[in-house]
Amino acid sequence: MSTDTVLMQALVYLLASVIAVPIAKRAGLGSVLGYLIAGAAIGPFALHLVGNQADVMRFAEFGVVILLFLIGLEVRPALLWSMRAAIFGLGAAQLIGIGLCIAAAAMALGLDWRHAAAIGAILAMSSTAIVLQTLDEKGLRRGAVGSAAFGVLLFQDLSVIPLLVLLPMLAVVPVVAVAGADGGLHGWWHALAVLAAVLAIVAGGRYLIGPIFRFIAATRLREIYTATALLLVIGVTALMQLVGMSPALGAFLAGVMLAENEFRRELEADIEPFRGLLLGLFFITVGASLDFGLLMRHPVLILALTLGLMAIKAVAMSGIARAFRMPWGDARTVGVALCQGGEFAFVLVGFVVGAGVLTSELGRMLNAVVAVSMVLTPLVFLLHERFGQGNAEVSTAAVPDAFDETADVIIAGFGRFGQIAGRLIAANGFRTSLLDVSVSQIELLRRFGRRIHYGDATRLDLLRAAGAEKARLLVIAIDDREKALELVETAKQYFPQLTILARAWDRRHAYELLDRGADVVERETFEGGLALGRIGLQRLGLRANQALRAANLFRRQDRRLFDELMPLRDDEDGFILASRQSQATLDQLLSAELQESVTSDRDRGWDTSSVAEEMRDAAE
Amino acid sequence: MKSFWPFGRRKRVIAKPRLAASGPSGGPVLERHNRRMLLILAHPALQRSRVNAALYAAVADMADDVTFHDLYESYADFSIDVEVEQQRLADHDLIILQFPMYWYATPALLKEWLDMVWLHGFAYGRSGTRLHGKTLLCAVTTGGEPEAYTPSGSNRFPIAEFLRPMEATAYLCGLAWAEPFIIHDTFQIDDAGIAIQAARYRKRLAELIAALPVTNSAPATATAA
């Protein structure tokens, strides 16, 4: 069955994703695996609903470019500079170390050293798309694991350029014309072109993009704004391809240049949907390009090679990360995350086969191994989460001396919210134990001389290490709603003596927290909003004391409402109805209070009108 | 147990009003009970107190007869719930105000409470009869020695003079004025002295409860607004 029209193709791809991804996600497999399965199902080697993947692949790789652009937007140049150790230290160590390991393994299998070297370089690459998507889904991208993995991936992207120059030199048979990416530019000219392109991106990002976007924004045409954003990314991609550089790297660079631009947030929001869809498409094409024919012919060989590759990469990467002083648990996670072959492998394989370094038979085999390893990554990650974490916990628990074990209060999440609560408590002489998962936050606070520990507070061993058995209070101020609920449950179950104070996202979350056993909840925006409203009243002409009392009344009514609606929280319709009615009562009450306050004082305590009236009556 | 004042399932502090579902008027409703004495404690820094804390502790086990109300714990932000407070006053026959004297007067929150709760139409005025027939006792501690409250002492006037505003309030609102319970010299008093005073306080409150006429034993309950 052949479906040639674009519409039919789109139909097949979308249908496959819409069916496979939610199921995979529900089953706890993650969206990446869902896309891969969908791809394999519709691919030419299974249902054959879609044909040759080469064209689609090229299109889908654009998803990786957009991903890198979006990441770049979040990385300010200063942050990039502070990550230099991760990029050039860990990254270089990974590429060289693992490249050598794989090359050695290849030689042990009887390959020529030149083949082995090329294979080592190619297979050392990991998949930016899969790794970042997986880490994102697991909530690990912003932690130590995330930044280490990101540094390594970035270095791999950087090294594609020199590899494109160096790999052809390994050719067994000299090839006269190297077809492809460098577009016929050679030597110095090539280097100059790359430099010029990079400079163009840097300068353009600095001086040109701002005015252009301001101009476009002034037209108030939403779709043109989106089109401009896309044009920017595609333009950078085209430029990079022209000079034979990794488009993903170019896009990343462009993103970094725009990270401090005032249009950053809008750019992000505009391009985000394209990223998701195109990345999904990318994963589908990887799934679809699985050559089941080759797999059928050499199932054992390919599976063995794949598992061997993943084992080497995971073990070696863990070792390297450990050598860079990461805790064992994190090092292992980084190793597992980076254990697959990358999308650049497909590019490089095509390139070196064209350059005569490898035979096309070997090339196909490599492609199959890389694709299978990509498919297996989410599964391996799941296994790691199920079984590998136990060991990781032991390793962290082995260094509990970093904590003040006699803390009175454990603050889980020392970000914008937890800091305020935690500082107030610490300033009054109570000992606090601080936990956070954001590395940059920890770094920042360390510079202010604050001791704060890295870790996911939902982990029992970490709580114990933080002193949960002897502490009196647990303040939960983590950003993740679900994790907060989980943490309440864990703490309630294992440390019943703890009084649990939790930051609630909103009313519903507050009820959920109370259901799980939190002792006190505070909606995170409530007091802030109230404070600002009070100042607003003052600026509108109310006396300070009047505004303060209005705010106090509002608070009291709202909290009463919260208590009253508590029994209705699970009954959606009843809840909405009741809260609407109560809201109306509250509004009425407040507006009556305020109405009155325009002409007289709203507090009856200082309202002398009734006394005056009575005295006048008496005088008559 | 310290209470963290937002909402949620916390253990109720003994003296806190229980808010049930709203009453017919939409206002809060207090629990029903048979206690006839309301002891209102107003101390802005109870954690530093010796005498007031000891007095409060000495009567803590009288919870069957006494509703305890720690004003600074309930309204640390001075945001007084007027309806709840009026209902609470109406529900009791004996009102005790226990406080240390500051600048010859009540602590600020107790004055605020009087301003906000003892309103025209509730406590005084033509229709303000809700406190009629109740009894008011002030239990006051002062740092000065008894001699300081004499014409030749540093405070010049007898302590009763400084309590005149309270006495006048009781008079205006139709409450009987009980002989104030005074403890002088709280800076000097030793632990044995405090114990004696605490026992005296306990005895005084018990006498007041015992002296209540039996006929008046049905306190106003939740339905009145």
Image: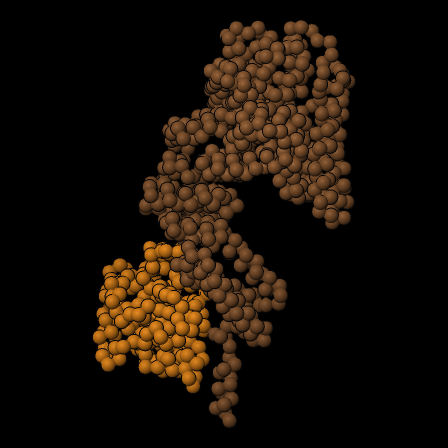
Residue A380, visible in the rendered structure: yes
The one of A155 and A298 positioned closer to us in this rendering = A298
**Residue A427: image x %, image y %?**
45, 47
Query: Which residue sits at x=52%, y=45%?
Result: A416
Q: Residue furthest toward the bottom?
A: A620
Which color scheme does this rendered protein use?
Answer: by chain
Q: Which chain appears orange?
A: B
**Residue A523: image x %, image y %?**
48, 53
The one of B119 and A267 positioned closer to us in this rendering = A267
Query: Which residue sits at x=33%, y=64%?
Result: B15
* Left or right: A409 in relation to A479: left
* Left or right: A56 in relation to B174: right
The one of A556 and A364 positioned closer to us in this rendering = A364
Quadrant of the rendering where the N terminus of chain A is positioned: top right
Q: Quadrant of residue B139?
A: bottom left
Q: How many marks can you see?
A: 0
Residue B151, relative to residue A169: is it above or below? below
The one of A44 and B187 positioned closer to us in this rendering = A44
* Left or right: A77 in relation to B165: right
Residue A322, relative to residue B178: is it above or below? above
